[in-house]
Image (spheres, rainbow, N blue to C red):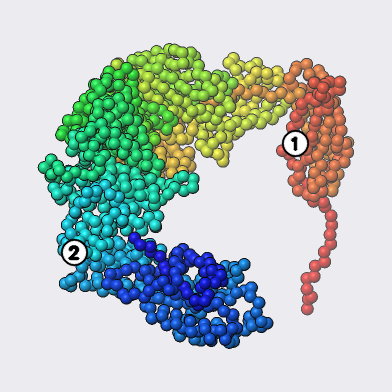
Amino acid sequence: MAENRVIVTYTTASSLLSTETWKQIHAALKVQFPLRNIHWKPASGSSILTIQELDVKLVPFENVRDEHASQIPMTLLEKPLLHIYVVACEPGDLETYKNSVKRQVKDWHNSVVSRKNQEWLILHLVKGDTPLPSGKLFQLKGSVLDKLRTDFNQDKRDRCIQVTWSTTNDKPSAWGEFANKVKDSLMTAFDAAVSQREEEVRRSESQQSMPGWNFCTFFILKESLASSYEGMNFFEEALIQFEELEELFNHIWTEKNFSWFGTLIDPGPDDDTLPLLSVSKKPYRDLILASNISVFDLRTYLLTRQCELLAKLGRIGQIAVNTSSFLARFGQRLRAAADTLPLYFVESWIYSSSLSVAQQYDAWFPPSPDGSKPSPLYASKGELYENAWHQLNVIGVDSGHLPAKPPFCMKLRRESNPHKRDSKTAISNKDLREIIHDREAFFKMYIDVTNRAISMYTKAGRRKSALKLHGTLAALDLHREQYSAALTTYSSLPAHYSPHTWTALESYMLSRALDAHAEMDQPKDNEWMHNLLSYLKSLIEHKGDQLLIHEDDKAEYISQMVSLLTQTTHDLDSEIEVPGHQIFSIEIMPEVDLAESQDGAYINPTVTNRLSCSLPIDDITVTVTGRESEKYEFTAPATVISPGCNALRLFCPAISMGKYLIRTTKIRVGNLVFHWDHRKVKSSNRWSNTIIRVPQDTHALSVTLDQSPRIELGKSPAILVTISTGRNNINHLRLRLGCPNIVWKYDTAVSQGEGIELESEGDSLVLRGLKEAGIYSLSLPHSDTSTLHDLKINIEAEYDTEAQPSITRKLSLTRVLFTTLPMSVNVQDFFRESRLISKFTISTTSHQHIRIASAALEMPLGGIDGVTIASPSSSPKVVTVTPMQPANFIFFIDSASGAVHESLTLVIKYCLLRAEVRDLIEKEVEAVMEEDESRIHYVSLINHLIQALGNDASWVELYGVTGELVIPDMPQDSDSDFGGKLLTVKENLARHQHPQNFDSTEQTWREIRIPVDIPQMHIVAAARMSILATPFGSVNSNGTPSLYAGQPISTELKISTSFRWGPNRDDQNQSFMMRYNVEETIRDWLISGPKRGEFIAKENGSFTTQITLLALHHGELPLPKINVSALPVAGDTESGSISIPSAEVFQVHGAEKVLILPRGGRSTFVVGTGSTQ
């Protein structure tokens, strides 16, 4: 096309044009271009458009002729948009302006103002380095610029501008106003021209339905507007014009009105090989003006103009989209007229056009300085090469080089027989003519074009497209019987597809890998099995049988593959585990059914076979785990899984009550194990973490642990193991306990009853011959647990029954056993001369209430000589210990022979209130359920009653006094049978009474035996303070005389000592230095005399002294307390420390008080009785 730039003319006085000054002026003018940052708001739009840079062509005014308007619409930029006249005279040289300049400017002005849609400017240049008369430089009135504005500015716009310039130091800022004036003038002229041309376009478009309207004429008119926008760098607006032309053409094509065109195509000798995006390959504009252009050429020209604009806009991807769309759609139209075209013309045209557009990309988008190109460019070129690759597929299939099946066979098939066409005419592409008859040349070109497309896709990061084409090369190797290369490629490609979930391509490649394996007749190894399983997985995920190559009988193909899989799995040397395969899916409901007639439970999973054929399996196993990681397995024997849903029934021979989490599922087919880990799957999936709930089987084997019913502190601890056989006659039971840091002494385990064959085998106990409905208990000693609060014990029981000796049941249980005692015991001792009084205080160590039947202090077997034990409370009475109310027990220990060196034993019989009440409830429920063989409500009744008691503690006080157990009300099930039994049990419990005699047969009491060491004391002192009648008298046995406040009272202080409770009998012959001190109670007494002193203590000796007391007030006053302590033994040390004998004193008068009377006296009062008349 001709040069399409904005034209600006310039002129000046002819005498200036030939001077050196003009050359400088001309150079200064050219420096101002191109213009930048030009803004324009079109009349038809609301947004402002910006031109970043606009190139301007400066031409002399004399070279432009004002030609008459042409009948052929031209671009608006073919005529100048702006004329500039340069005036170069001094600002104050009005004489020159009047005589010559004005006339020259007037002549030029008259010639430009008559031109439509063209603007003009008068530029007055003032040379900055020219010396001027003083004051004339800034003289505004009467200057040349003023004269120019007065003479030529005919409207409000100022078209005259003055610029001060210098040849040596030209400042760009001096030309700023000039540049702005040029921008405004250009856009004003362009806006007027565009408005006029748009009006012409609208007028022509509105006349479509009128006779004589011609699309080609309208096309030229519309194109002139688009070319004008393009010359102004408004590429978006220019593209819109061509898009509107394309839309109008499609409308005309739909109406099949081709009167303005020639034929669909008039193929020239090189039409199939000429560059697609070239406007110079044909005289398109002349053909359009002559209305003799073919549809093929018109659409090609329209596409070319659009792509040129898209290239200037940098829309790389859109060029490829438009080109590929045009080649596909117009190629389809050409195939409809294929009989009139040379053989393979359409394929050659699309092939050559795709390659030419890819080459045109390199011209439009050269690489950056670092050699890189944007990824959309590589992606677009890859699409073009793939488009050319498709044409090779068509030629290859038609010429017999490629098989007529995917990935070579296209969906678009020929509608005519190519062999019926005239063979004299041929395509012009020599390379394509050669490959039609040369098989190896075809393969070489096919591989080359494919690799070029793969290279472009790889650089663009489009892995899926590149990998798909890799698959076609593998298919070509398979077709060429290069099986090894094909198998290698097909086997490697699915690994690239899987991470991106490209299941369609993955399935296709896997199916081809299986075909390559079959063609090579290789053994069915692990790799083949992996490919087959991956193929079935992708097929199921995509849910599309169209991915299978064998389209004749898809179900038969799958059935054959599954049959081969089943045969191969049984021949495997080792087991292969396949995690998370989609062949099967399992849904497990939370409900579990008890076996009823035997120990164990059933689950009822639904296994869905997603294949279209049956699959035999050897077994299925579902593993569940409990709260404490105990593990159980539900299994089912060999069966056939039919397509769709299959209801199965899996059995676990031994499982305890509770909630279990489904952990894994395994389905075995030969040595192939399909494995699903339910813990690793999201909850939104069908394989979500499912919890099953196993009800309690009251007739199944159960093992419970408890503290030993008899606890002896200081001896090896033991636990009580209770085994309930339920419905089972057990031949052999192996019991194993596990607990960290605890050693179980199986060899010393003791049976608590008869009828148990108990043996110790390593780390387990073996019991034999356990009968149905039997309850067997044994005591199992273990290592010390005094530092532990509780024990978490894992129980493993393996057993077989007489009814099913071939089934070994394994039961795993977890029990928590508290090792701490439920009570704490504190003792307080009080020494007397021959008696020790011990007070035992029993408190609960938790929130639990404890029922104590008795507490006794026992001597060793055979007794102790001279020692007797008595208790002030001998009647049997149950005492309840609560967290707020401890219990006290007092014992008298009388020793005739002194200190007691043997240990005694405190025996406490007790039970927890919770256990007592639970036993009572179980007893009453058992009585009500005697006639109900199903015992369906046994567990629920007990749980309901215990829960009701736990929610409301108002029953505790009444039960503790009378034994009546009033169950609080609680919502219950609507089951009438359950409600009736519950009401009966509640009535029986409300009538319950504590037995009169708490015999062991009526209540199961636990026993704690605590060793008690009798304390020893070197010196036991008895302090006594007695009132004397007179200071020199003796203690009056007949009574105490009257005592008054303030009266001195003589008292005798007597301290008796005894060494009976000392550790050594030899100490009775010794003497110890003692110190006494009478406590001063200054609120009650004043003390006078030896209130503090020392004395020598001897066995059964005494010390007496007198002190005087003075009561400070009247009333009943206790006598002062006497403290007695032992002094260090002279010359006796132990380990470097001074030895001080232990001593305890009791106040003999501690409970006595003396009556102090108020002091007597006489007072006289005069009382007036009133006057008498």
Mark on residue 517? none
User: Mark 2 highlights which residue?
Assistant: 260
How packed mark 1 is, by other alpha carbons closer than 10 Å (few <14, some 14-19, many 20 or more), is some
Hey, which quadrant is residue 970 in on the image? top left
Residue that appears at 34% across and 39% down: 452
On the image, the x and y values in percent for residue 386 come to: 30, 42
In the picture as drawn, the residue positioned furthest to the left comes out as: 420
On the image, the x and y values in percent for residue 1043 come to: 81, 45
On the image, the x and y values in percent for residue 390 come to: 25, 42
Hey, which quadrant is residue 882 in on the image? top right
Hey, which quadrant is residue 136 in on the image? bottom right
801 relative position to 147: left or right: left
303 relative position to 93: left or right: left
Front-most of 91 and 322?
91
Answer whether residue 465 is visible to the viewer in this image. yes
User: Mark 1 highlights which residue?
Assistant: 1149
Answer whether residue 248 is visible to the viewer in this image. no
Pointer 1 or 2: first along the chain: 2
Front-most of 178 and 590?
178
Look at the picture and state if 378 lies above or below 698.
Answer: below
Amino acid tagged 2:
Trp
The CA distance from mark 1 to mark 2 is: 144 Å
For the image, the number of numbered tags is: 2
